[in-house]
């Protein structure tokens, strides 16, 4: 009787060990490293076409955020006239770059990704504007050079993804970029006309992206 009891205990321990190994193996197979690549198709504050992207790396470790990077750029052209009919012609190239952290939240059919980001000059990110200024004063046009500005930016975003075969996911994303209004001509001291506050800009807006994630 005693031998049977010992045998039964050994059998139970062996079975538990075997089931534990299967469980660990299944968990390991469920883990992955994912590479996200998205392209920007629109930015709500841009007057025309945009150029941009978002990339990220996902890992299987719980509670530790994933890391990514976003970039968007566009060109804004405008003319401003003062009360004396002097005119500023402005061409502003704006580039917005952020480093972001995000989490993937699985659902039965889709995957939701939520995250936040930040950009600043000391991180080699943020918003940068380069404005080429031409002023027509008393009927004579003159190139006044460029006014370059940099400012910090905050980002919040989400992606909605549709996975296939546990290795590929196609998703749609929206990145909200926020910062204070800036005077795009404030670095130029050669402007002679009086243009009030018409040259202040707020380029806060949303970047729409489409992309894919590949898991390994």
Image (cartoon, rainbow, N blue to C red):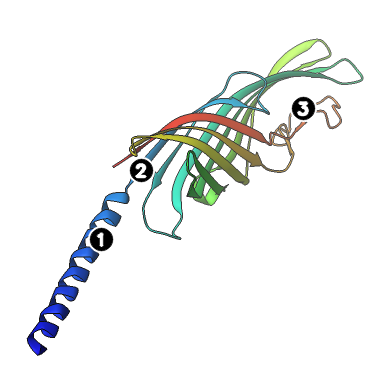
- The residue tagged 2 is 34
- Residue 110, image x, y percentages: 49, 39
**Residue furthest to the top:** 139
Q: Residue at x 71, y 32 (%)?
A: 184
Which dot, 3 or 2, sits closer to the camera?
A: 2
3 or 2: tag closer to the N-terminus: 2
Label 3 neighbour load within 10 Å: few <14, some 14-19, many 20+: some
Q: Residue at x 84, y 24 (%)?
A: 193
**Residue furthest to the left:** 3
Which dot, 1 or 2, sits closer to the camera?
A: 1
Q: CA distance from mark 3 to mark 2?
A: 51 Å
- The residue tagged 1 is 24
Horizontal side, residue 155 vs residue 196: left or right: left
- The residue tagged 3 is 191
Q: Is residue 48 above or below residue 215?
A: above
Label 1 neighbour load within 10 Å: few <14, some 14-19, many 20+: few
Quadrant occupied by the N terminus: bottom left
């Amino acid at each position: 009787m005693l031998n049977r009891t010992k045998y039964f205990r050994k059998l139970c321990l062996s079975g538990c060990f075997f089931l534990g190994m299967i469980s660990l193996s299944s968990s390991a197979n469920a883990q992955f490293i994912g590479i996200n690549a998205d392209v920007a198709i629109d930015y709500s504050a841009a007057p025309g076409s945009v150029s941009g992207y978002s990339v990220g790396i996902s890992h299987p470790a719980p509670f530790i955020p994933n890391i990514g990077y976003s970039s968007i750029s566009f060109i804004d052209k405008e003319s401003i006239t003062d009360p004396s009919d002097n005119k500023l012609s402005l061409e502003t190239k704006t580039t917005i770059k952020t480093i972001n952290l995000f989490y993937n939240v699985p659902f039965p059919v889709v995957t939701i990704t939520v995250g936040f980001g930040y950009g600043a000059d000391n991180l080699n990110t943020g918003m940068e504007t380069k404005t080429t200024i031409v002023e027509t004063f008393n009927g004579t046009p003159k190139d006044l050079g460029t006014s370059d500005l940099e400012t910090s930016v905050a980002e919040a975003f989400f992606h909605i993804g549709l996975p296939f075969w546990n290795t590929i996911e196609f998703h749609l994303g929206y990145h909200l970029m926020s910062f204070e209004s800036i005077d795009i001509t404030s670095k130029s001291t050669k402007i002679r006309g009086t243009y009030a506050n018409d040259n202040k800009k707020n380029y806060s807006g949303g970047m729409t992206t489409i992309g894919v994630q590949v898991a390994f």
